[in-house]
Image (cartoon, helix red, strand yellow):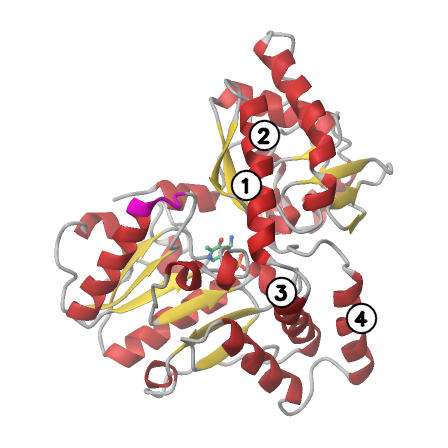
Amino acid sequence: MTDWTWHKRAQSAIAQAYLTNSKRPESLVKGVYPTHMARGQGCWLWDHFGKKYLDFVCGLGTNLLGYSHDLLVGAVSEWVRRGWSHSLGTHLEVETAEKLKEAFPAVDAWKFLKSGSEACNAAVKIARAATGRNWILSEGYHGIGDDFVSLVDPALGVPREPHYPRPIASLEGMPICKETAAVIVEPVVTDASPERRKWLESLREACTKAGALLVFDEVITGLRWPKFSVSGAWGITPDLVVLGKALGGGLPIAAVGGKYAVMNGAEYFVSSTYAGETLSLAAAKATVTLLQTKFDLGQLWEKAGAWVAKFNAACDGVVQIEGYPTRGVLRGADLPKALFMQEACRAGMLFGPSFFFGFPHIEAAPDALPAIGAIAQRIRGGEVRLAGEAPKSPFAQQVREKRS
Ligand code: PMP
C-alpha cells in the first residue's frame, strides 16, 4: 500500500500537490504506487523504504542512457567546476549546437530552451514571424503553452484568443489554408505504420504548397529513433524540429531548429536567462556524442522490439504495449490494465501512462519477463483484486486523443 507521508507534505507545500501531471497518484494506481522516489541508477529507482523498482517510465522518457550514467556525470561535473550560468555565452553552447547539427543535418541553426513547452511555444512564434500568418494547426501534445492548453476544455486560466490552434483533424482532407503559419504534429505518438509515414509525406507536400511551415515536435521521438529522429529515419524534413526529454538525459534542455531562412529570417524574440546554462548543455553534448560513438540507437531499437514482442505475447488478453520499440503506451481495458500496473508495482516494476525502453533495459529487462508472464497469468485466472484506483488518463493523453 502507498505510504502517504511525502504526498501529505506535498499537499501543504506544493500547489495542487504535483509538479508533473503524469507523476500524480491519479495517473498511476493510486493507493498502490509509491508517490516519491529517493534515488535512481541505470534503469532502477529506489523509494524511501529502500524498495527497488525496474523503471519502464524512465523519467517520462528523459533517461535514455539511464539515471546518473557515469559518462554524463563526468561531463556535467566538469561544468559544475567551471560554472553553470555565465554573464556571456559559453563555448559550450556553440559546440553543443554544432554537435546537434551533425545529428540533424537538415537543421542550420538552433535555439536552446529549458523545456519542451517553451521550445514548442518558440516554434509557433518563429513560424508566425517567418510567415506573417497567424493560424496554427495542431495534432498531439505540445506542452503547457496557452496556445496548446486551449485545445482541451475547459482550459481554465487561458483567455479565448481568436488565433488559438485548431485541431488538425478539423481540416483533414482539405487544403491547408493560406492563413496557416504552421502545422505542428508529433510525427509519431504510437503509430509508426507505413500509412502514418505516407500521411506525413502528404502533410509535408500540403504544407509546402500552402506556404505553411511544418513543425515536427520530436520532444519524445528525438534521440530515440534510429538516425536520431522520425525525420531522419523516414527522410521527411520539417521546417522546424523541436527536441527535449532525452536530449539532456533528464537535465532541463530543449531545442528548436530549422534552416537559416526560418531561424534567422525575421526579428522574433525568444530569449531566456537560463538558455545557456552549462550543466544541461554539457549533458546534451555528451548524449549526442555518446549516441554517435558508444550507444547504438539501431541496436536499442532491435533489442527493445524483441523485448516488447515477448512482453505482448506473455500479456495477451491482459495488456499490450502499443507503439514503436523504444516507446509505447499500455493498452487494455481499464481494469486489467490497472491490475497489471498494480501487480507489476508490487513485484518491483514501474509502468506508467507511457512505456519507455532505454539502454540499461537491454541487460535488465529480459530477467523481468517470467514475473510479467506470471502476473498476466494470475490476472487471466481472475486471482487478482484491485487494491487502489484505476489510473486516469493524464492531460497529455487527452490532447493526443482529441481529434476535432
Ligand atoms: N511535446 C511533447 C511531444 C511532449 O511529450 C512533451 C512532454 N510530455 C512536451 C512537448 C512538453 O515538454 P515539457 O514537459 O518539457 O514542457
Q: Nearer the viewer, residue 66 or 5?
A: 66
Residue at the image point whose x is 32% and y is 85% from the top: 261
- Amino acid type, residue under disc 4 in the picture: Gly
Q: Which residue is mark 3?
A: 291
Question: Can the viewer see residue 324?
Answer: yes
Mark 3 or 4, nearer chain start = 4
Q: CA distance from mark 1 to mark 3?
A: 19 Å
Residue 272 percent across, percent down from the top left: 55, 79
Q: Residues within 10 Å of mark 1 (few under 14, many from 20)?
A: some
Q: Residues within 10 Å of mark 2 (few under 14, many from 20)?
A: some
Q: Which residue is mark 2?
A: 310
Mark 2 or 3, nearer chain start = 3
Q: Nearer the viewer, residue 251 or 13?
A: 251
Is 184 situated left or right of 212 in this image?
right
The secondary element bearing badge 3 is classed as helix
Q: CA distance from mark 1 to mark 2?
A: 9 Å
Q: CA distance from mark 2 to mark 4?
A: 35 Å
Residue 192 counted in the magenta span: yes
Residue 59, placed above or below residue 53 = below
Q: Which residue is mark 1?
A: 305
Q: Which residues are magenta?
A: 191-195
Mark 2 or 4, nearer chain start = 4
In the rendered image, the quadrant that contains the C terminus is top left
